[in-house]
Amino acid sequence: MDADLDTLSREELIAELVRLRNAVRAHRDSSGHALCWHHPALWNLLPEQEQAAPIVPEWPVFLRGCLRYRQSLDEQLPDAPRSSEEFSGQRQA
C-alpha cells in the first residue's frame, strides 16, 4: 500500500512528512463548528484516491452521535474555552 515511499529520496521523504504533519496540525487545530465536518482534504493526502462513500447515519442517530461527541468534549476538555457563536451556514476550514 505504501510502496510509493520506497522510491522517494531522503529529501522527498522529509518533504512528505512535513506535508502530512501540516495536514494533521490543520485538522488538530479545527475548532468551533469545523469540528463537525467531513474532512476529505485530509484523506486526499493519501496516494490512493479511491473515495469510499461514507455511511451517513439517519438523522436521529446522527444527532445522538453529535450530542455524545459534544459530551465527550466536556469530559476530555473540561477547561476548554466555550463559544456561543452560531453556525453561519458556511463550511469552516
Image (cartoon, rainbow, N blue to C red):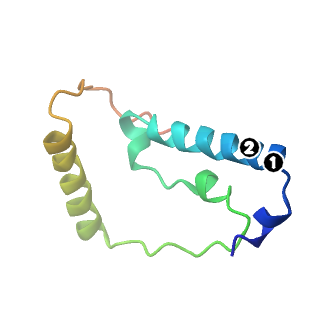
Residue 17, x across and y down, in percent:
67, 46
Residue 20, x across and y down, in percent:
64, 47
Q: Amino acid type of disc 1?
A: Arg
Q: Nearer the viewer, residue 77 or 14?
A: 14
Quadrant of the rendering where the N terminus is positioned: bottom right
Label 2: few (<14), some (14–19) or many (≥20) C-alpha neighbours in 10 Å: few
The answer to whether the residues at label 2 and label 1 have Cβ atoms under 8 Å apart is yes
Residue 53, x across and y down, in percent:
56, 75
Q: Nearer the viewer, residue 21 or 67?
A: 21
**Side of 48 relative to 23 (left or right):** right
At horizontal 59% and vertical 76% (from top left) the residue drawn is: 52
How far, Cα to Cα, is label 2 from label 1?
6 Å
Res 20 label: none
Asked if 65 appears above or below 79 in the picture, the reply is: below
Residue 50, x across and y down, in percent:
69, 74
SS class, disc 2: helix
Label 1: few (<14), some (14–19) or many (≥20) C-alpha neighbours in 10 Å: few
Asked if 6 appears above or below 72 in the picture, the reply is: below
Quadrant of the rendering where the C terminus is positioned: top right
SS class, disc 1: helix
Residue 60 visible in rendering: yes
Q: Amino acid type of disc 2?
A: Ile
At horizontal 30% and vertical 67% (from top left) the residue drawn is: 59
Q: Which residue is mark 1?
A: 10
At horizontal 84% and vertical 57% (from top left) the residue drawn is: 8
**Which residue reaches farthest front?**
10
Q: Which residue is mark 2?
A: 14
**Side of 2 relative to 59 (left or right):** right
Of the two numbered discs 2 and 1 in the rendering, the one whose residue sits closer to the viewer: 1
At horizontal 40% and vertical 34% (from top left) the residue drawn is: 31
Residue 7: image quadrant is bottom right
**Side of 9 relative to 36 (left or right):** right
